Amino acid sequence: MMMAPAASDAGFEALTRKIARERGFACSAYKPTCLMRRIAVRMRARGVHDYAAYASLLDRDPAEYERLLDALTINVTQLRRNAEAWEALEREALPALLERHGPIRAWSAGCSSGEEPYTVAMSFARAAAEIGRPAALDRVHVVGTDIDERSLERARAGRYAEAAFREVPADDRARWFTAGYPAEAGPVLRARVQIERRDLLEQPAPAGPWHLITCRNVIIYFDRASQDALFERFATALEPGGVLMLGKVESLLGAARERFEPVNVRERIYRKP
Ligand SMILES: C[S@@+](CC[C@H](N)C(=O)[O-])C[C@H]1O[C@@H](n2cnc3c(N)ncnc32)[C@H](O)[C@@H]1O
């Protein structure tokens, strides 16, 4: 049986430094317990019992390196994930953004395989229809970014299995995606969404202005200092009146609370005054 690794384990530190150096994955900004759990899954899968042996396996086996990076980035997602949060966004935040003149720009930060940026576009469409201004959707531009190339490829393909649609209303399913499974995002939805690679820890925000930033189920894996830095970057990147939406179990912490006012705390929706 493998021993539970300790954060101070020299082998663990050497391994995470190696991953950062060779693959640019900034391990030091992630919670060590989270990294350990993920690495332990891969070590178990390969029957390796210590970090040094696993590091040399990575040197010999590039496919294992890819599987490890996949495991570290944890890209579970689905369309309209936690639907009640999107309903709150449509009701309480998007109408004011849609009343603006000119382009309306949304950034889905840590978008995994694209379900979230496509959801943002569909949500704007629902809110625009609700306020009787469906044409406002033409002014909406959504940029989805992630660090993980394989997820980004899937995001660009915009093709999803039935399970991804669990929380999608039937009218959105029929309107925006091709029939059958896997279902592909149609051209009108696709035209609203652009996908780019970006490391949230190492790179600045993509060029704005930004009126909505969604960053859901991403910061939970980051250590506190990285979370603080990211919140500050979001606050700077958003226009006044711009909206930040976090994941169900994430909250604004520390100084970031001064930079935003709550829109719907339960659904983790905040506004920059
Ligand atoms: C659990 S998924 C969340 C997907 C989506 N936002 C949602 O809530 O359903 C977490 C995503 O964060 C991405 N991620 C992790 N670290 C990142 C970083 N430093 N920069 C950009 N994306 C990162 C992962 O690749 C993964 O796709």
Image (cartoon, helix red, strand yellow):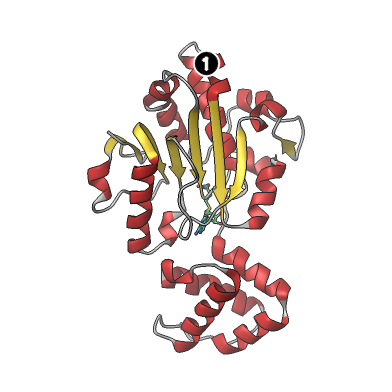
**Secondary structure found at label 1:** helix
Residue beneath label 1, please?
129
Q: Is residue 187 left or right of 81 when viewed as pictured?
A: right
- Residue at 61% x, 35% y is 193
Answer above or below: position of 190 versus 196.
above
Residue 132: where, in percent of width, then height? 49, 10
Q: Is residue 178 visible?
A: yes
Q: Is residue 229 left or right of 80 when viewed as pictured?
A: left
- Give the number of callouts: 1
Residue 160: where, in percent of width, then height? 69, 42
Depth check, front residue: 262 or 207: 207
- Residue at 45% x, 88% y is 10
Q: Quadrant of residue 158?
A: top right
Q: Quadrant of the N terminus?
A: bottom right
Q: Is residue 167 visible?
A: no
The kind of residue on which mark 1 rests is Ala
Answer above or below: position of 128 versus 228.
above
**Residue lying furthest right in this view?**
180
Answer above or below: position of 107 versus 232.
above
Residue 26: where, in percent of width, then height? 49, 68
